[in-house]
Amino acid sequence: MLDFNKEDISDVLVRYNVAMEKTLTPDEAAEQLYPKDPLLKAVAVAIYDGEEDDVIEALDALLDCGKAPLSLIDQALLPGMAVVSELYDQGIIFLPNVMMSADAMLEGIEYCKTKTSEIPEAKGTVVCHVAEGDVHDIGKNIVAALLRADGFNVVDLGRDVPVNEVVAAIAEHKPVMATGTALMTTTMYAFKEINDKLVEKGIKVPFQCGGGAVNQEFVESYSLGIYGEEASDAAKAANYILKNGANIDKLRDEFHNH
Ligand code: B12
């Protein structure tokens, strides 16, 4: 019987002029996705490696260049995590790596928050949560961090939050806006339930929803829903409400793609 190992087969293919597709290692695949700027790349590499200390060190290098601490969430930490998400989507890395990277990134967000004194007096309250059954809280944490950075008081209910708990918190805190994050197509339906319970109680708070699973069409299917694509849209919407009021149609005009 012929004993073909990988080298034997590739030799044969080369001899017959058949190109073999080269499989990239995870490190090589990551290398192709990192930002080009060396300081931003250092943050991305540290997130990919899941090394919290290296994330802090790389952030310090950017802070030393005079970057505003909170701008680093959007400009350095998010692009770093995007590399990891992309590699996970492509099946190149697996959940344990993603969890380590997520923790390193969240540590980075906390660090950026400690480095700023920009936080002004609270403009108003926003209640944030991740949908019932869903543990994906990275996006929600960014939303909450950016809202706080913009001067809002954030009541962060956390992740996997039961529908009734969200409704009760909104009734209690009377926020200018509520936010929901869902990354799974199975969990996003909790937003509709929250919406209907709020309407039943006569609470007409704009309810901005986002996260990987959610799209504008889905969010428009319930009456208080405003779609949020980027984390930074939350602070934009909350500021818009303070200035122009909480009319849902106007908010959709302003924040939805037409
Ligand atoms: C990290 C991750 C995890 C981590 C989560 C860690 C954590 N603390 O969050 C861990 C490892 C725990 C995990 C577990 C699971 N995961 Co997962 N995970 C991911 C991954 C790789 C990245 C998600 C992420 O954090 N993205 C980065 C953040 C920043 O993005 P984001 O939340 O969407 O937020 C951005 C915007 O959407 C927006 N945004 C978010 N919310 C809001 C709200 C408002 C108001 C606004 C304005 C904007 C906004 O702001 C952010 C940046 O701008 C995705 C794949 C992917 N590429 O998305 C899979 C993914 C979400 N996971 C998936 C699955 C299936 C699971 C598991 C069920 C796996 C399993 N078999 O156990 C479990 C879920 C358990 C559960 N009950 O929730 C699927 C979901 C499929 C689906 N559509 O239903 C995905 C899409 C992977 C896939 N391709 O299959 N996961």
Image (tube, helix red, strand yellow):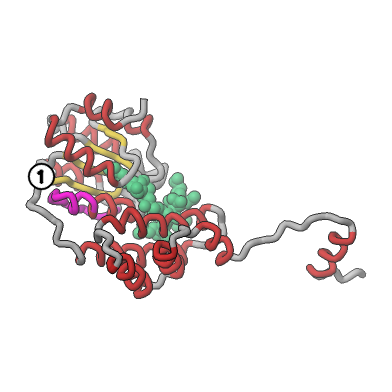
> Against 76, is 198 above or below?
above
Q: Residue at x 13, y 39 (%)?
A: 176
Question: At which x and y percent is residue 76?
Answer: 36, 59
Asked whether residue 256 is in view, the answer is yes
Write down the quadrant of residue 164 in the picture. Answer: top left
Q: Which residues are magenta?
A: 146-159
Does 200 sit left or right of 216 as displayed?
Answer: left
Number of marks in picture: 1
Q: Position of residue 157 (x, y in %)?
A: 21, 53
Q: Residue furthest front?
A: 65
Q: Is residue 80 magenta-colored?
A: no
Position of the C terminus, as image quadrant, is: top left
Where's residue 55, x and y in %? Answer: 36, 69
Please tell me which residue is depicted at 54% across the width and 63% down the height of the picture.
31
Q: Residues within 10 Å of mark 1 (few under 14, many from 20)?
A: some
Residue bearing mark 1? 124
- Observer-nearest residue: 44 or 185? 44
Relative height, residue 169 to residue 98 (above, below): above
State the residue in front, 242 or 195: 242
Q: Is mark 1 within 8 Å of ligand 1?
A: no
Image quarter of the N terminus: bottom right
State the image coordinates of residue 93 (x, y, percent, origin top left). Answer: 53, 62
Most extreme residue toward the left is 121
Q: Is residue 68 left or right of residue 2?
A: left
Tell me, yes or no, if residue 181 can be seen here: no
* Identity of the residue drawn at 10% across and 45% down: 124
Point out the residue furthest to the bottom here. Answer: 53
